[in-house]
Amino acid sequence: MNTENITPWVADWVWGLPLIVLTVMFHVVGLRFIKRRVDRRIQDVGKHQTLSLGVVTLCITLLHVVEMGLWACMFLLLGALTDRPTAVLYSLNALTAFGHMDVELQRKWQLMGAIESLNGWILFGLSTAYLFVLIQLIWSRDATTARREFY
């Protein structure tokens, strides 16, 4: 057994798991903030569905950008990448599971890139679930309003 490869993997998990927890908590708080704003304006949301969903999508995208920035900062802090533009590009690539980049992390931090990709799946799942519920709410309000006006 090659013990040389064990230590970096432990370090990847030690840094990666707390980042997953931090970004998921940040994402849930952000979605909760967005939900409160939508709840206050739910009457207007029904009138301006496309615009409302666009604004909500923009806000969710900004959450993802901040989370990507946290990962990029961590890669710079750990010395896994050498400059900010490369770290941002790598992090966005990993978080979205895009997978078409020539940028690689230092060998000892490569598992952390995969961990970030796992984090991206979780975050995008949360975002998708939120948008699905919002669309269901808007459509159910439309159906209720249409029934009231019909009868």
Image (cartoon, rainbow, N blue to C red):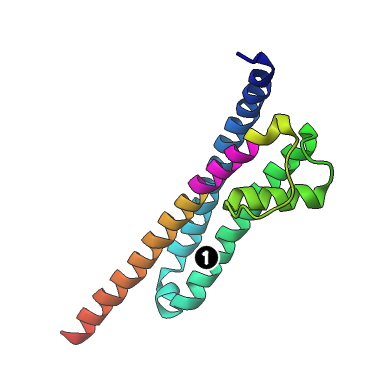
Task: Count residues near mark 1 (Cα–Cα under 10 Å), then give few for <14, some for 14-19, many for 20+.
Answer: many
Asked whether residue 66 is in view, the answer is no
Give the side of residue 27 with respect to residue 137, left or right. Answer: right
Q: Residue at x 39, y 75 (%)?
A: 46
In the picture of the structure, the residue carrying the numbered disc 1 is 56
Residue at 49% in and 72% down:
52
* In this view, 11 is above or below 69: above
Q: Could you say which is closer to the camera, residue 35 or residue 112? A: 112
**Magenta segment main secondary structure:** helix
The quadrant of the image that shows the C terminus is bottom left
| Above/below status of 51 relative to 19 | below
- Between 102 and 85, the one lying in front of the other is 102
Residue 39 image-quadrant placement: bottom left
Residue in the image at 57% along x and 51% along y: 97
Q: Which residue is farthest right? A: 83
Give the magenta-colored segment's residue range: 112-122
Queried whether the magenta region covers residue 113, the answer comes back as: yes
Which picture quadrant has residue 61? Answer: bottom right
Q: Is residue 70 magenta?
A: no
Q: Quadrant of the N terminus?
A: top right
